[in-house]
Amino acid sequence: MSRFLDYSVYQSAHSSVIFAIHFVFLAGWPFIFPMPFHFLQFIFSIALSSISSPSSSHPPNLNRSIFFLISSAFSPFGCALCLYGFSQDFARIGLRGFFIGSIYAFHYLFKRRWVLEFPIIQRPTYFNFKMGIPLAVKCAFKFSTVAFIFSAVFLDIIPHPFKCSIGTPAFFAEQIVFFVASFTIFLCWELSHNIHRVVYTERSVFAAETNPCEHLLLALEKRNPTSLSGYLAYLDLCMVWENNVDTWWRAAFFEESGETYKREIAVCLRPLEQLTSRLGEVLGNSAEKPTNLSNPLSSPTDVKHLEELSNAAVVSTLISCLLAVENFKWATANSGRLDIATATGKRKNGPANSKAYAIADVLKTSIYQIVSAFHDEMLAGTKASLLEKDWIKSEKPLFGSREMLIQKLRLFLDFRAS
């Protein structure tokens, strides 16, 4: 709730500034309706926030998508009138506003811009927002240009009683003011999209003074695939492990009993185990489930936080998952079977194959990090014939055989993994 309040405050602030600038530069036009403008912008911001999701595999439901479409269509209808004024051409202006809002809504949903992208480097809110302003201005100009042209053609094609004589001074004045008004609306929306991403992907510290790890582990263990708190918990865990500033918190993970570390290992390996199991099922039954081949490949960011966790369970899970992803890549690139070709598009640069390559790169990097950190210990274990005992679990892996995992680990140890 606090994030939404912060987002609403920032959204109202930049909308007020943009409205004031618009008023100053076009002071000759009778747009004196700031309150309806801000109200409509607020409704759009609510709709935008309602469809956002941290995972691309969990799109917004139908009701929220319809609410976003309706809000996007009617918001510029009213905003255009607020910016242009209730003159004799208000019906035509409102109709064009409705059309450009519909274009933006369909583009936003089709391009999956509702997916929250978590930044690798966490910066202050103002700095992150400032960095997104040039892109927001660029996108707003593109949208306003395209929407201006298409709305003009649309208004000329459909029959309506609001025709305007072409070539008159009033016609040219209307086009200029409408373009400026549409640019103002799209700039407010793009800045709202920018500040929403910044506010909702900021790090949330889960540490407590008495038990610094318990809140974080509970959030990870109860993680819902569509819940933002689970992603923020993983982000917080990454920040703790990848930085040396929270040494007191890092030390809490290694308390004497070792239970905290085991719980952390379990919650971190869970996404990889699920991915490996699903890939194993798909590759083992591809003739029955051809449409599921691309679904298991969620996101490379789900595995990035495992680079520093080095024990037999982690190494076994990483290598087993890597073998599953590499088999998936081989199946999509080389198999001549119709079901696999249909499910993946048989394209080397298709979306499913691109995710497979990205996840494989992250997995290899994670394994290389572990091998580099424990290279001497692994070499000593190899000479003493203890490598597979110390670094590969004795249980049957989720994908492949134990012998395949040992062979792959030796390849990484020799820095000859493909």
Image (spheres, rainbow, N blue to C red):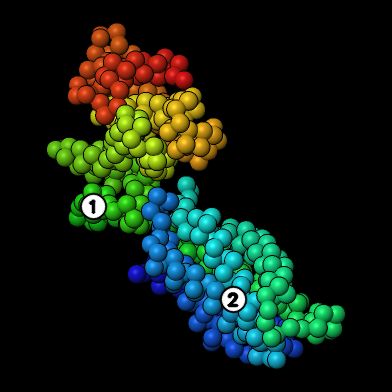
Question: Which residue lies at the image location 54% right of the left edge and 78% below the top edge?
Answer: 74
Question: Which residue lies at the image location 62% right of the left edge and 58% below the top edge?
Answer: 135
Question: Which residue lies at the image location 49% right of the left edge and 73% below the top edge?
Answer: 70
Q: Residues within 10 Å of mark 1 (few under 14, many from 20)?
A: few
Percent x, y of residue 52: 43, 61
Q: Nearer the viewer, residue 407 or 149?
A: 149
Q: CA–CA distance between discs 2 and 1?
A: 42 Å
Instruction: Choose the circle earlier in sequence order: 2 or 1.
Output: 2
Return the mark for residue 98.
Answer: 2
Q: Is residue 43 left or right of residue 244?
A: right
Asked if residue 287 can be seen in this view, the reply is yes
Above/below status of 6 relative to 89: above
Disc 2, SS = helix
Residue type marked 2: Phe
* Callout in the foreground (2, 1): 2
Above/below status of 366 relative to 138: above
Q: Nearer the viewer, residue 43 or 15?
A: 43
Percent x, y of residue 214: 21, 51
Percent x, y of residue 47: 45, 70
Return the mark for residue 28.
Answer: none
Q: Residues within 10 Å of mark 2 (few under 14, many from 20)?
A: many
Q: Is residue 122 left or right of residue 289?
A: right
Q: Quadrant of residue 25?
A: bottom right
Residue type marked 1: Lys
Asked if residue 19 can be seen in this view, the reply is no
Residues at marks 2 and 1 touching, judged by CB atoms closer than 8 Å: no
Q: Quadrant of residue 371?
A: top left
Quarter of the image with the N terminus in it = bottom left
Above/below status of 320 relative to 206: above
Return the mark for residue 222.
Answer: 1
Q: How many marks?
A: 2
Question: Which residue lies at the image location 46% right of the left edge and 25% below the top edge?
Answer: 335
